[in-house]
Image: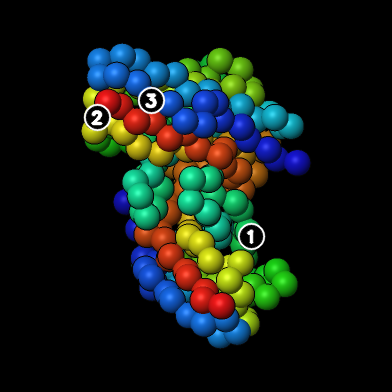
Amino acid sequence: TQLLEQSPQFLSIQEGENLTVYCNSSSVFSSLQWYRQEPGEGPVLLVTVVTGGEVKKLKRLTFQFGDARKDSSLHITAAQPGDTGLYLCAGGAGGTSYGKLTFGQGTILTVHP
Amino acid sequence: GAVVSQHPSRVICKSGTSVKIECRSLDFQATTMFWYRQFPKQSLMLMATSNEGSKATYEQGVEKDKFLINHASLTLSTLTVTSAHPEDSSFYICSAAPGSRVHEQYFGPGTRLTVT
C-alpha cells in the first residue's frame, strides 16, 4: 500500500508571507498531482508533475517533484487571502493500480489579511 | 475543457431508502471514473474504480452491495447508496481522466448526502 505523508496539516499565516507544503513517501509514484479544494466543492487540479526533479511554476506557486519521485513540495510566495483552502497532494500509481491516486492528508491553509 | 459534473449537489433522504448520484464527463470520454468519500476537513478516501462496460473495483472495506456502481457509458457513472443509514452521510466526489492521462483526474463538484 502506498502512503503519502503531507505536512503540515494546518497552516495559518499573514498575508505576504511565504509557505511550503510537503508530501513525502517511501514509494515511487509515476506522477504527482496537487489540488486545491474549497469547502463544499470538488478539488481543482493545479498541476501534474511526472519527471523526477521537475519544477513547475504557476504564478506565485512553485511545485517540485523529487529526483527519486517519492516526494514533492508546493511553495507559495507572498500568500494572499484568496489562497485560503485545502491543498491536497496525490500520487499516481503504476502497474496493476494504474490510474489510482493516493492522497495525502491535506493541508488547511488560512491566510489572514 | 475537462469538466466533470455531478447530480444532485445535495440530497437528504430517510434511513432505509436508496439514493443515486450521477457523475458525467461533459467534454471528454472517460473509460475510468473514480468515486471518493470525504469527511469534513479530511482528505479524500477512494471507494471504488468504475470501469466502462465492466464491474467496478472496490477498495478494501467498501461494501459492494451497499455502494452500487454502474458505468453505463463513456461519459456517465452512477453511485447508488442502498438502504442508507445516518453513518452514510458524507460528501461524495467522483473524478474522471481524459484519454490516456489517467493520473490527471478532474473532479466533480461533489454531492452532499444527509441521511436522517
Secondary structure, mark 1, is strand
* Residue that numbered label 2 is attached to: B86
Question: Is the residue A63 above or below the residue A96 in the image?
Answer: below
Front label number (2 vs 3): 3
Q: Secondary structure at mark 2?
A: helix
Q: What amino acid type is highlighted by mark number 1?
A: Val
Of tags 3 and 1, the one toward the viewer is 3
* In this view, A17 is above or below B63: below
- Residue hosting label 3: B12
Report in which chain the residue with disc 3 lies: B
- In the picture provided, is A5 more to the left or to the right than A40? left
Q: Nearer the viewer, mark 1 or mark 2?
A: 2
Q: Amino acid at mark 3?
A: Ile
Position of residue A92 relative to residue A65, above or below, is above
Could you tell me which residue is drawn at 41 percent across and 48 percent down? Answer: B44
Which residue lies under the disc numbered 1?
A: A47
Which residue is more in the foreground, B71 or A86?
Answer: A86
